[in-house]
Amino acid sequence: MSVYCSRLSLTIMALAGCVGAFAQQAGRAALPPDDPEVYFGFFSLRQGIQKHIVAAKDASAGAALERAAARHFNVSESDFAIVGLVTNSTLGALSALGQEARAYVAQERTAGRTPDPGRAAAFHERRLALLREGAGALQKSMSPAGWGALHSYINDRYRSHIVRREPTHAK
Amino acid sequence: MPSESEHNRKTTVRALLVSSQIVLVALAWPAAVRGQCEATIYGGADDPVRVDSNHVMTEGQTWTSDEYGYWTPYVEAWQEFMAPGASSGGPITDGEVADADPGDTAWVELTTILNAQGPGTYWDYGFHWAVANQDYCPGWYDEGFYYDGPGLTISRPTIAGIPAFWWLGSGVLSDHGYYAQSALTANPNGASGTPSWSVQMLETGGVTLQCNVCTDNVATSTSFSCGCYPDVTIWATYGGFESEPFNVTIVKPSTLTLDAGYPQDSNDQDGYLSLYQWSLTDSCGYQDAGLDGNEVFGAWTDDYFNSTGTHNNWGLPTAAQAYSPTNLWTDKIWVEPCANGKPKCTNPQKPTLSTVAVRHNTPWTFYIGTQTFGSGVPVESDTQQNYLDHGRHQ
């Protein structure tokens, strides 16, 4: 990408494309341990696997995938089921919160007003709080060994494969 | 399948498209909007999941975290593969694109059938980006980034066991440490469940397996390989994912070679003893010591009657069986005493042996692998001929 972009930069630097691109690549960062967003990504991953389990061609294939997924996360099948329940609950609450936030923003925009930054920040804080609650629910509901294994998986394995970046505004 | 350069080109085009909008709109937009459009974009891939023995799933995900829900996450993902020993890999699927509502996760999962693709390392290769609502966040864009997820190396199951064993004749399972069976154990190498076994037999080699669905098995030879090379292949398949082939050579005692200096004819009272000695080798050319053997006479023909009209009255020999600690086998053809014989036998004549044929049996057959008459592997079959003064295999 960089070579091609450098060539282009002679003509479009004024449009700020490449400057932003380089800045963004450099801006990739790992997430800190126990960052709520790590848990969001993990819950999403667990939900995606659950969809696969439900869509399996038959009950035995679904059960096999469930066992494989439990092994994948180093937890027992019973703990894996608990993770599924917490996932559904947390993502359900987040989905409702997202709808509420988007409805509020749409309502303000329709009315020709700029959404209140305080309300928006509050929505965001509630999102983070729900994620922390979800992580707490995992810890409370799972067996100690299961939580230990999963916590380690999320923070050691999964977190190492997720990066975050800030988008750019052209200037 | 887009190449890396195509990916780059695609990305740059995206940047150009967004950038061109920026110039038109950004100049007129108040700087105060910026705070509303800040966001964090997350993307990556988890370790591939071994869905079952024969499937591996990779996934890529992107999501955004922004306070106003102005950013839509996207992911385009490929499943990549690198064969064992290769220095680089490449995509084995088309790119698949997904998006999601702001606040949700854009998710692409790709699953490959392992048996078709084979052993190697699998991983997710994804392009992760987000698009801002340009009504509210004009000039904001995300160029996205590529991310290689962690790899999962898959090996085929294997079968452990002795790949060369014996054919000792029908129903003979062993003989003094020579075995017509091999214990086999399947190693799943990460696959799950209990394997089903299959056999492919080429040319003449053949085996039967003790069980069809099991981890530990026993292969029993039902015939022998054509020559000294494997022509039987056994697989243990876990949920459709075949093991590495387990190639079997079935060796058999095959050849008696007459040793130099034989046959030896000598006097035996008033008759004769003709001694044969052979060396036994197998279908791989090795000398095989320590086996059982037995002889079986064929139908007897009275040559003396056919030539003179008088029946011979020589007593019929008794078939022999024995164990040989070496690879040497002997056969003694003797007739004694025959003072009252019709015809009368003699000591071997010198300088020229008699050409008068008395009787013969055919086929005379010699078996290796057991002392049970008529069982084992036939290694020699000929006509055993008695003359007046000597005996011959011919």
Image (cartoon, rainbow, N blue to C red):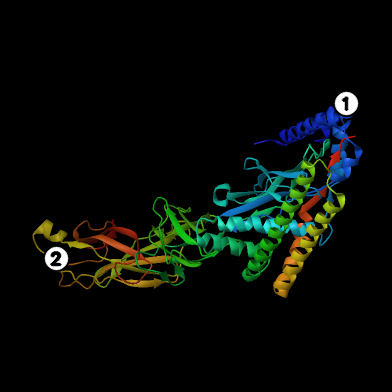
Looking at the image, which is closer to me, B349 or B73? B73
Q: Residue B245 placed where, x, y %?
A: 52, 54
Point out which mark residue B312 bears: 2
Crowding near the residue tagged with mark 1, few <14, some 14–19, many ≥20 C-alpha atoms within 10 Å = few
Q: Which of marks 1 and 2 is in front?
A: 1
Quadrant hosting residue B299: bottom left
Q: Residue B32 placed where, x, y %?
A: 91, 41
* Residue, disc 1: A10
Crowding near the residue tagged with mark 2, few <14, some 14–19, many ≥20 C-alpha atoms within 10 Å = some
Amino acid type at image mark 2: Asn
Residue B87 visible within the image = no
Looking at the image, which is closer to me, B47 or B312? B47
Q: Which residue is drawn at 82% across and 36% down?
A: B138
Q: Please determine if labels 1 and 2 lie on a single subunit.
A: no
Quadrant showing the C terminus of chain B: bottom left
Q: Going by the image, does A126 lie left or right of B85?
A: right
